Image (tube, rainbow, N blue to C red):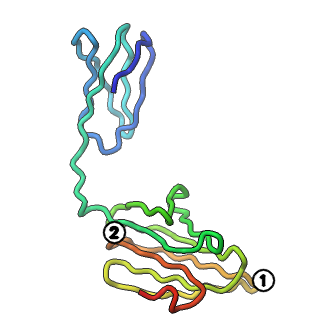
Amino acid sequence: MTVGTADGGAQSFNIDDISTVKATTASGKDVAVTLDIPYGSFVMPAEDVTVTVTYEDISSEDKVTVIAHFDEDQYSVRSSTNYDWNFKEGFTVDKDSTFYMTVYDNYGENFYVGVKIGDNATTYPATMDEDSGEYSFGKAFVASGNMVIKVGPTESSVAF
């Protein structure tokens, strides 16, 4: 990346999964870079700077995918572990990490959740709240393999 001229201004950046960062001025002089995980910074000189970043080699064996299949009009699937995760589009997490998932039926009706982790599949019924009569599901999962989640109105609709 190239950073514009802003003499003396501190420039900051996130350094997750970065192994080295080198900043060089347009005239070829090295600029001191401070790495304080998860951030890095340098003082901007009076000329343009080119920042060269080398990323760590991340093994795909250390990551697994998580994706859910459900009717977005009927159900809400979320995680309090990371509110930005989009279960419908899918995402990756560290293998063997634990996360909490909640599912709600937007109309308060009964439903089932099918979860397949690697080759193991389990079906869970939603739980009815005695006070409201509405159904929900919440459980912590260990992502020991790629995960596929199905949400539907019947056990057979979420079977693998």
- Between 155 and 81, the residue placed more toward the observer is 155
Q: How many residues crowd around disc 1 within 10 Å: few (fewer than 14), some, or many (20 or more)?
A: few
- Between 19 and 134, the residue placed more toward the observer is 134
Q: Which mark is residue 131?
A: 1
In the image, residue 120 above or below residue 26? below
- Between 151 and 96, the residue placed more toward the observer is 151
Residue drawn at (61%, 85%) of the image: 111
Q: Secondary structure at mark 2?
A: loop
In the image, residue 19 above or below residue 159? above
Identify residue for label 2: 96
Residue drawn at (60%, 86%) of the image: 153
Inspect the image, locate mark 1, and give the three-letter code of the amino acid beneath it.
Asp
Q: Secondary structure at mark 1?
A: loop
Q: Is residue 99 left or right of residue 65?
A: right
Residue 71, position in %: x, y? 58, 73
Q: Quadrant of residue 20?
A: top left
Inspect the image, locate mark 2, and give the three-letter code of the amino acid beneath it.
Asp
